[in-house]
Amino acid sequence: MTSPSSAADYRVIAGRLAFPSKAYIDGGWHEAASGKVFENINPATGAVLGTVAHGDAADVDKAVAAARRSFEDGAWSRAAPEERKAVLLRLADLVRAHAVELAVMESLDSGKTIKDCLNEIGHEVPTFFQWYAELADKSFGKVAPTGEKTVAMIVKEPVGVVGLVLPWNFPLLMAAWKLAPALAAGCSAVLKPAEQTPLTALRLAELATEAGLPAGVLNVVPGFGETAGQAIGRHNDIDVVSFTGSTEVGAYFLKYASESNLKPVGLEMGGKSPFIVLEDADIDDALIASAINAAFWNGGQNCSANMRQIIDLKVKDTFLHRVLEKTRALVVGDPLDPGTDLGSMVSAEHQSRVLSYIEAGKSEGARLLAGGGASAGLPGCFVDPTVFDGVTPAMRVAREEIFGPVLGVIGANGVDEALKIARDTDYGLHATIFTRDIDKAFHLAKRLPCGTVAVNGFTEGNVTTPFGGYKRSGSLARDNGTEAVEQYLQTKTIWVSLR
Ligand code: NDP
């Protein structure tokens, strides 16, 4: 992928984009059944990008009917695995070929930086389609040890029609996290993007048709959570839901399932993840880059953001000094400028929410060392990267998910206290540990109740490793890795008695 190098170039591309505006159902574009539309706003400028079909229960019904028909006709669900693989590999190539267009579209839609959008869409999204494509024809069933007189096969079958309800923080990447394994498994899908960021998922559906995905296998219904999202959650002909978003809405999906067809629900939800620095850690460039990335990547709008930075008191001053230096050097501004580190928050509503947490930090007595408010002189929903020292475990900023660029430092006296503070949370998505002592690293890794532990470098892992949360961060389902496919498969025993 060759990408332009200036904001001016990206603005030219932006000017030429045609934004999708309708639902994508059964291989074609459809207005909402109600005829309603909603405005889609660029949060970095406040400009209206266009209107999008406001899908609701009637459109979800239509999409589910198309998905069910496609599932039953078997053109995808019963296709040979190598045929599914070929289509998904073509889709990966098409995403690569259209990466710059998609990245600009996503940046305009979400306020995310073009740098991040290019990385996610140019590299990660196609990698997901490619990896699960390659897995499609390399997954075997089992034969049970039942003795001479029988053959008992344990086979996996696609679960059917899956409902995928997505957040706005990584719009196309989250679509790929869920769609790639679901489609590789042979399922048909009804996908609802977040209302703030519907564009790239819609464009992806069109590219999937171009790649050869049969009509009805991937349907995208833009709309609002309480209508389209709830209709997916309550639909009696959707077999599984996979959701990423807030813990509050994740809980609704359990309720919807219990009040409809008891569909299994995979949940990937909020976090309040710790970043632990022990006294023996080298406070070097790599550690500081990790600390900054852990708190400020994607403007902190990241479920695995390590906002609670628990630093041994012996190294806290050095750590803070270096973190502040880096924080002050971060560039906040035009998301289409390749030099920008932090773009806009996704919406004015979300900006207010983040700012209210910053005010809570100040009023609860945390010491503000950097940032602390909306970015001056910028037209959209920007928030300056903010650093608090003197955060205590009881403060709201230490307990509730902020989902914005706020780094809070909590001092700890030794490894045991660091572990105690780190464990003191309702969430369990992620943790990072810095230490040179491998024994301490493993001790902490085993004692931290969360789905991913990163040692000596902040990372969520990659396509090969499962991602999901303990406690109020998730269900047993996992995105990514071979585990993700399990969400979209069911197990059948075929018991043959031999004569
Ligand atoms: P939500 O959890 O509200 O949204 C996630 C998805 O669920 C969206 O597609 C949304 O639709 C849909 N949804 C919302 N309400 C319902 C409902 N009642 N029934 C069915 N579906 C629904 O996240 P928000 O966008 O409101 O963000 C709020 C907070 O959630 C953030 O501040 C952050 O703390 C957390 N969050 C966590 C994410 C993660 O990756 N774990 C991602 C996004 C947010 P719609 O967009 O139309 O509302």
Image: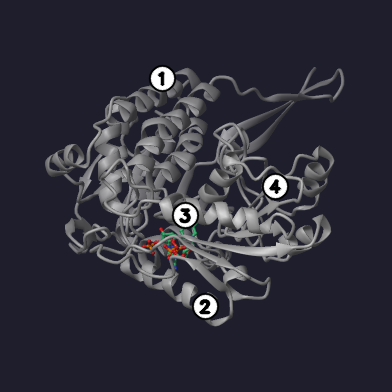
Indicate left or right for 453 with 352 as reference. right
**Residue kind at label 1, given as amino acid type:** Ala
Q: Which mark is residue 362?
A: 2
Label 4 CB less than 8 angstroms from ligand 1: no
- Mark 1 or mark 4: which comes first in sequence? 1
* Discs 3/2, front: 3
Residue with the mark numbered 1:
86
Q: Residue furthest right?
A: 147
Q: CA distance from mark 3 to mark 4?
A: 20 Å
- Mark 4 falls on what kind of element? strand
Q: Which mark is residue 115?
A: none
* Discs 1/3, front: 3
- Mark 2 or mark 4: which comes first in sequence? 2
Where in the figure is residue 397, as x and y percent of width and height?
57, 71
Where in the figure is residue 377, as x and y percent of width and height?
25, 65
**Residue kind at label 2, given as amino acid type:** Lys
At 25% from the left edge and 50% from the top edge, which residue is drawn? 108
Verify CB contact (< 8 Å) between mark 3 and mark 4: no
Residue with the mark numbered 3:
327
Q: CA distance from mark 1 to mark 2?
A: 55 Å
- Mark 3 falls on what kind of element? helix
Verify CB contact (< 8 Å) between mark 3 and mark 2: no
Answer with the quarter of the image where residue 284 lies: top right
Residue with the mark numbered 4:
433
